[in-house]
Amino acid sequence: MKNSVFISMILALVIVLAGTSSAVLVLRSNSNVNEIIYDEHFYTSMGNQYMKLGDVSNAIISYEDALKLNPNNIQARHNLAIIYHQSGEYQKSIDQLRVLVVLEPSNPVYAYDLAINLADNLRYNEVDNLDEAIFYFELADKLESGYARSKENLEVLKQIKAVIS
């Protein structure tokens, strides 16, 4: 009886924390030990919930767990890129976005976000990513003309390049 109450409480907690029906869990009884197995969507949902609560550290852990199960999990990878950008960890964000532009080469969001992170890495950390940032702003604009002010950003970077060359 105690065991079933405990399992019910765990299930209720999982449903509350996950916030979606995409959390999949399987309970197995194996010599009186219950093992809960989660899928990538569960960890992504947990990351989303942690972000809503402002718990960035646990959100990162959850998204990384989702990526261990499926390295092609777009949402988990993009959310990690956003977290890293917001915390000024541009190289980590760049690493995530480089994977995303390969996974979804026709999505201007990832090309643009990569260009922004490359430019910010240049601006704040003096890492010379200027040509690559220009390339990804051009790509974003090519994929969707005028996407998120890609042309304006591109012109600024070209002016900077002309000055430092």
Image (cartoon, rainbow, N blue to C red):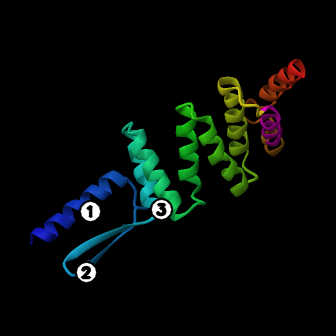
Please tell me the numbered disc located at residue 22.
none
Secondary structure state at the residue bearing disc 3: helix
Q: Which residue occupies the extreme left position in the image?
A: 1
Q: Earlier in the sequence, mark 3 or mark 1?
A: 1
- The image quadrant of residue 23 is bottom left
Range shown magenta = 130-139
Query: Going by the image, does 113 lie left or right of 50?
Result: right
Q: Earlier in the sequence, mark 1 or mark 2?
A: 1
Image quarter hosting the N terminus: bottom left
Identified at 10% across, 68% down, the residue is 2
Q: Earlier in the sequence, mark 3 or mark 2?
A: 2
Residue flagged by tag 3: what amino acid is it?
A: Glu
The residue that disc 1 covers is 11
- Mark 1–mark 2 distance (CA, rounded to whole Å): 18 Å
- The image quadrant of residue 14 is bottom left
Identified at 69% across, 45% down, the residue is 110
- The image quadrant of residue 25 is bottom left
Identified at 44% across, 65% down, the residue is 39
The residue that disc 2 covers is 30
The residue that disc 3 covers is 40
- Mark 3–mark 1 distance (CA, rounded to whole Å): 17 Å
Image coords of residue 6 (percent x, y): 17, 64
Image coords of residue 65 (percent x, y): 46, 57
Crowding at dot 3, Cα within 10 Å, few <14 / some 14-19 / many 20+, comes out as: many
Most foreground residue, 127 or 145? 127
Residue flagged by tag 1: what amino acid is it?
A: Leu
Secondary structure state at the residue bearing disc 2: strand
